[in-house]
Every structure is written in C-alpha cells, then in structure tokens.
Amino acid sequence: MKIDAMGNLIAVKKGKGGKKIMLAAHMDEIGFMVNYIDDKGFLRFSIIGGVQKYNSVNSTVEFTNGVKGKISYENKENPSTVSFEKMYIDIGADNREMAENYVQIGDMASYSGNFEVIGKRIMGKALDDRAGCWALIRAMQNTQSTENDVYAVFTAQEEVGLRGAKTSAFSI
C-alpha cells in the first residue's frame, strides 16, 4: 500500500503477470474552506465540491481540529434565496482575534453528523463515500488469486473534479 502525492491510498494484490485492473472509491467529502474572518468573528467561506445552499443554512459543520460551527446568513437576506457570499460560519467567537484562536484562513470543515441506525436504515453524512470504500475493501478481501494485478484505489479530490481517480489511473 502507498499514499500518492494527491492523497490517494493505493493498495495492490499482485496477480500472475496479467493486466492491471483498477477499482476505485472516493473518500473525500464536500465542505467549506475559511477564506476570511470578519471583525465579529464570523467565518466567511468558499465551498468545496457540490455543496447545496438549501442544505447549508442552519447546518452544523466541524473543522478537522474538532471546532464546530453553525452556518447562518446575514439578517437582511431571504433564507430561501441567500447566496453563499452572504453566509458565514458562527463558531461562537466574539471577534476576529478570538476566532483566530480556533480557526485559521484555509482551514476546512465538513457537515457534522453522526452515523445512526434507524429501523432497517443507516443514516449519516457522506454515505456514498463510506459505502463505496466498504464495498471496495470487501471486494479486495474476497479476491483470491488472480491472473491480473488488482489495484484498490481510495481516491481523493473526487468532489472537485475526479482529480485523484485521473492521476491514479494514469500512474497505474
């Protein structure tokens, strides 16, 4: 196994010298990146991937360092038509200096959410990622000997243009 420069995790099961077969599942999530902290301590952000406005207002997000915040919008805006430029993340800071003790420009967050089993259903964030990665792991576990080299690639940067899958396919 190895991690490449894009952040892809690549595992291989060597075959008997046949072709190279790549199976891929993405493991990145949509999210938010801080691009400005205003004087009130609110975090202005840009989106990463296919974030939907209607899913974002009043959502809780979590930064990689564990800090949580709530997405809100400027009071004069209509919540059903508000643009991302008028939204912010509130982490409970009173001012810019206080916010900078917890979050820096360039820090990234994703939707916060717990995995839950409700009846016969499972619910949680980024289940497309998790289910795909699980299926890829199970496929590799169930692959015994093969004529071909089988590469399991857990890709990065799928949400921003399939970058990890493209570069790993090229390198393999």
Image (cartoon, helix red, strand yellow):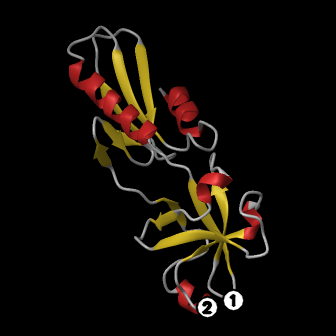
Q: Which of 13 and 102 is in front in this view?
A: 102
Q: What residue type is labelled 2?
A: Asn
Q: Is residue 37 above or below residue 147?
A: below
Q: Residue at x 35, y 20 (%)?
A: 150
Please tell me which residue lies in front, 117 or 44: 117
From the image, which quarter does the N terminus lie in?
top left
Q: Is residue 72 left or right of residue 80?
A: left
- Kindly indicate the quadrant of the structure image that contains residue 13: top left
Query: Given contact means CB atoms under 8 Å apart, are the residues at marks 2 and 1 in contact?
Result: yes
What's the CA distance linking mark 2 and mark 1?
Answer: 5 Å
In the rendered structure, the answer to whether residue 148 lies left or right of residue 85 reads left
Give, as a three-letter code, the residue at label 1.
Asp
- In the depicted structure, whether residue 23 falls above or below residue 56: above
Q: Mark 2 points at which residue?
A: 95
Residue on which disc 1 sits = 39
Q: Where is residue 21 in the image (x, y as percent from the top left)?
A: 42, 17
Front-most of residues 128 and 23: 128
Asked which secondary structure carries label 1, the reply is loop
The residue furthest front is 119
**SS for tag 2?**
loop
Q: In this view, does 86 lie above or below 6?
A: below
Q: How many other residues sit within 10 Å of disc 2, few (<14), some (14-19) or many (≥20)?
A: some
Q: Nearer the viewer, residue 63 or 152?
A: 63
Q: Could you tell me residue 102's position as x and y percent?
A: 48, 81
Residue displayed at 73% across by 76% down:
75
Q: Which mark is residue 90?
A: none
Residue 90 in which image quadrant: bottom right
